[in-house]
Image: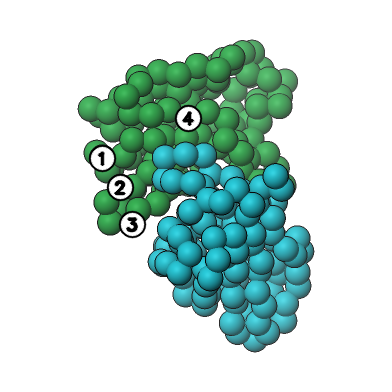
């Protein structure tokens, strides 16, 4: 099945700086890569996703890039704001064996005002 | 659409008691999932279902059971509750494995 790993586990950035979180996946057949944001005490919610036929996708201050050859994808947050402080989960779909969405362990992002 | 609805939101169980966490979705999604999230940790998959009548184990199924008799409902059963099952439980659903997964608001369970 799919194995998804996230690095770093915790990331602290100054307000206004950029934050980058990287995920690696193992199943070369995976074709869907979402990112979820979980604020403290809340449920995870989708913030952006990318499919394997696209290398980059942007939505205002967030972007996701995908490198299929290296099997990694990254979340980029520019001009960080205090409300960006949260846990971010990446995921990848597993098309063989266990046919499901596999999540990484999450990254804690702390934006320092 | 209400999305994914979980009940209850909070529960305290005594060791050895049993309970069922309810999850229902009104989006006609095929896939449903149960995760547990320990404090400061990630999401661990307990069980999942790809459609009515079909369930499969995730990473941490021991101590839990599920059923999927309808498309809408995916209850999680805890038999003989143990302190190690103290956690926040999230139910989620998606139409396929390459579409958005929607999460319920979570159930905070404490076993004492």
Q: Disc 3 or 4, which lies upstream in sequence?
A: 4
Q: Residue at x 43, y 58 (%)?
A: B50
Q: Spatial distance from mark 3 to mark 4, Cα to Cα?
A: 21 Å
Q: Spatial distance from mark 1 to mark 2, Cα to Cα?
A: 6 Å
Few, some or many residues within 10 Å of mark 3 (<14, 14–19, 20+): some
Q: Spatial distance from mark 3 to mark 2, Cα to Cα?
A: 7 Å
Q: Secondary structure at mark 2?
A: loop
Q: Residue at x 39, y 35 (%)?
A: A32
Q: Determine the chain carrying the residue at label 1.
A: A
Q: Secondary structure at mark 1?
A: loop
B21 to B94, vertically: above or below: below
In the image, the chain rendered in cyan is B
Identify the image's colour scheme: rainbow, by chain, secondary structure or one colour: by chain
Q: Residue at x 26, y 40 (%)?
A: A29
For residue A56, what is the image quadrant? top left
Q: Residue at x 58, y 15 (%)?
A: A61
Which residue is labeled 3 in the image?
A98
Q: Disc 1 or 3, which lies upstream in sequence?
A: 1
> Does residue A19 appear to the left or right of A6 in the view shown?
right
Which residue is labeled 1 in the image?
A29
- Badge 1 vs badge 2, beta-carbon distance below 8 Å: yes
Which one is in front, A2 or A12? Answer: A2
Which one is in front, A71 or A14? Answer: A71
Which residue is labeled 2 in the image?
A95
Task: Name chain A's colour.
Answer: green
């Amino acid at each position: 099945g799919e194995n998804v790993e996230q690095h770093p586990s915790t990331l602290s950035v100054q307000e206004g700086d950029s934050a980058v979180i990287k995920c690696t996946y193992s199943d070369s057949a995976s074709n869907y890569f979402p990112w979820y944001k979980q604020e403290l005490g809340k449920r995870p919610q989708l913030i952006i996703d990318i499919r394997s036929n696209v290398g980059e996708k942007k939505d205002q201050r967030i972007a996701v890039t995908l490198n299929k050859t290296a099997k990694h994808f990254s979340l980029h947050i520019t001009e960080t704001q205090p409300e960006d402080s949260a846990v971010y989960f990446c995921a990848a779909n597993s098309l063989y064996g266990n046919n499901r969405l596999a999540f990484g362990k999450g990254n804690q992002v702390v934006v320092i005002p | 659409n209400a999305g994914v609805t979980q009940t209850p939101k909070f529960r305290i169980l005594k060791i050895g008691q049993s309970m069922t966490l309810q999850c229902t979705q009104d989006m006609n999604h095929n896939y449903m999932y149960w995760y547990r999230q320990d404090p400061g940790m990630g999401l661990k998959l307990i069980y999942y279902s790809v459609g009515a009548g079909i369930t499969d184990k995730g990473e941490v199924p021991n101590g839990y059971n599920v059923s999927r008799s309808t498309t809408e409902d995916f209850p999680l059963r805890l038999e003989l509750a143990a302190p190690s099952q103290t956690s926040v439980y999230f139910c989620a659903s998606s139409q396929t494995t390459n579409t958005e997964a929607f999460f319920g608001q979570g159930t905070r369970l404490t076993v004492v």
